[in-house]
Image (tube, grey):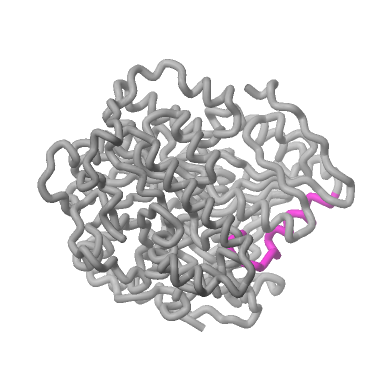
Amino acid sequence: MAKTTAGRGRGAKGAAGASRAAKAKVGGANGSRANGMTANGSGALRRGADAFMLKVGLAEMMKNGVIMDVTDVEQAKIAEDAGACAVMALERVPADIRRDGGVARMSAVDMIERIQRSVSIPVMAKCRIGHIAEARVLEALGVDFIDESEVLTPADDEHHIAKHDYRVPFVCGARNLGEALRRIGEGAAMIRTKGEAGSGNIVEAVRHLRSVIGEIRAIQALPAEELMSTARDMGAPYDLVRYVHEHGKLPVPNFAAGGVATPPDAALCRSLGAEAVFVGSGIFKSADPAARARAIVHACTHWDDPEEVLNACRGLGSAMEGLEMSSLAEDEKLANRGW
Amino acid sequence: MAAKRKRRTGGDRARPVVGVLAIQGDVEKHLAALERCGASGRRVLVPADLVGLSALVLPGGESTTISKGLDRHGLVEPIRAFAKAGGAVLGTCAGAILLARSSRNHPVPTLGLLDVEALRNAYGTQVDSFVAPADASSRPAWRGMECVFIRAPRLVDPGRGVEVLATVDSEPVLVRQGRRLACTFHPELTDDVRVHAALLELAKAGPIGGMDG
């Protein structure tokens, strides 16, 4: 029976960690296990299935919700008040990162701490792809979720973080099923589309959602003996390919991100199978952030009721300006970071 | 918005229909758990969705988000009325906070259907989330049940009408008051359906006029 908390102790908060360690010794007598989250081939069993269950559990709690990028306490409160189910604390929204250029790193910890103190909903933060030390700092800070994000400048151009080694859950971006399953194999507890962050253009998120969901459908239809060569061709762990074949879904929640700017954008992502939506620049680069934040939350809840989405569209002022994809060179696309 | 939505039929008698508040949270996990118990689930988003339900689940999720949604969807009074008419209600984690008489630590407006106070995020952030079995001071039927706590609240200062069914570290994690159940953990994330089955038992008991508030 695995222990609940993976990875290291909590340093300064060691006392709390110690009492938790005592609780972590779970008896397996009644045989109840987390549904569908144990033998999913994610490698979680190496680190403790309970630890992975807790991470995926928080992702489950964010379903049917909207996660909003915020850059200060005031924005965090606007997001919470609008009904966001979590905030992503970062220094610059993706549209500004794109405009400013240069190296984009993990945000200043003081800013993240101020936001943690000001809201009661989960606080996420981004680290650079492959930046093990930034991730450890965010874990020590007690953020609720880490986004190993292509929006920041990658720290490692070949390797992503070994995420099962951490107690904090990770979300990662993916453009297709192979990429999603590689990230889950490394320990991601949530997958989001990459979309094209900071573009205000939903086309890439739609492409990535359709790609992931379409490939899931195709794998479901395969005969069992074709799964191994499919795993080889996709560059995905075989056990996860088999999980998808058997269950018709990812073993972790599948969210949309990258380019959501309007209530119908959120509803579109939900209708294509996204279980929740991230909004980055779309809210605080618009004319009336509070109203737009509320409206996107409403559209995410009522995505299959056009009249409610229509109601959400009223009185919003202008949306953020968008970028046409053909105006971006391939090396300007954030989605091409990571593999 | 309530009137537009068509009323759905209640299903066959052998298969009770249980609502799951669908504003935000892990709605699908509860619907699946209810299916495993032989009930059919229905998403609840507007007051009309409450009609004909045997029981109602307030799921896990973000209590701030769900609380604001209850208000915006005009569901606060209809849910109170459902419970006061004897409808069985289960709140898990965020749902337990919403059932409480009040909440502390970034308080959110609550429904006041359960005579306890909820202390939000009482164990810390996500890195403090944990799994633990219901301990020896739990009622026999609940001992050893695996409880998954995710950014969980604590239930403190229970009133006299509140029965503590299960504890972890001798603190209440599953309580009952009349036909209202609340747990600070997530039974919907494990294969153990005892909590959902208990809700269905409470729903079966027939009209209970005046049993509680």
Give how far across and how far down residue A276 sits, in percent.
Answer: 47, 45
Q: Is residue B106 visible?
A: no
**Residue found 50% across the figure and 50% down from its top:** B118
Q: Is residue A57 left or right of residue A257?
A: right
Q: Is residue B53 visible?
A: yes
Q: Nearer the viewer, residue A100 or A68?
A: A100
The residue stretch that appears in magenta: B187-205
**Residue found 45% across the figure and 77% down from its top:** A48
Q: Nearer the viewer, residue A175 or B90?
A: A175
- Tell me where residue A99 sits by quadrant: top left
Q: Is residue B78 left or right of residue A84?
A: right
Q: Main secondary structure of the magenta part?
A: helix
Give how far across and how far down residue B137 sits, in percent.
Answer: 60, 73
Examine the rendered structure and indicate whether residue A55 appears above or below residue B213.
Answer: below
Looking at the image, which residue sits at the far right?
A: B13
Give how far across and how far down residue B146 sits, in percent.
Answer: 58, 71
Examine the rendered structure and indicate whether residue A314 appears above or below residue A30.
Answer: above
Give how far across and how far down residue B37 sits, in percent.
Answer: 76, 59
Q: Is residue B27 left or right of residue A294?
A: right
- Tell me where residue B75 sits by quadrant: top right
The quarter in which the C terminus of chain A is drawn is bottom left
**Residue found 23% across the figure and 69% down from its top:** A12
Examine the rendered structure and indicate whether residue B28 appears above or below residue B138.
Answer: above
Verify whether residue B168 appears in magenta: no
Looking at the image, which residue sits at the far left?
A: A102
**Residue found 72% across the figure and 36% down from its top:** B82
- Tell me where residue A321 sits by quadrant: top left
Count of residue discs: 0
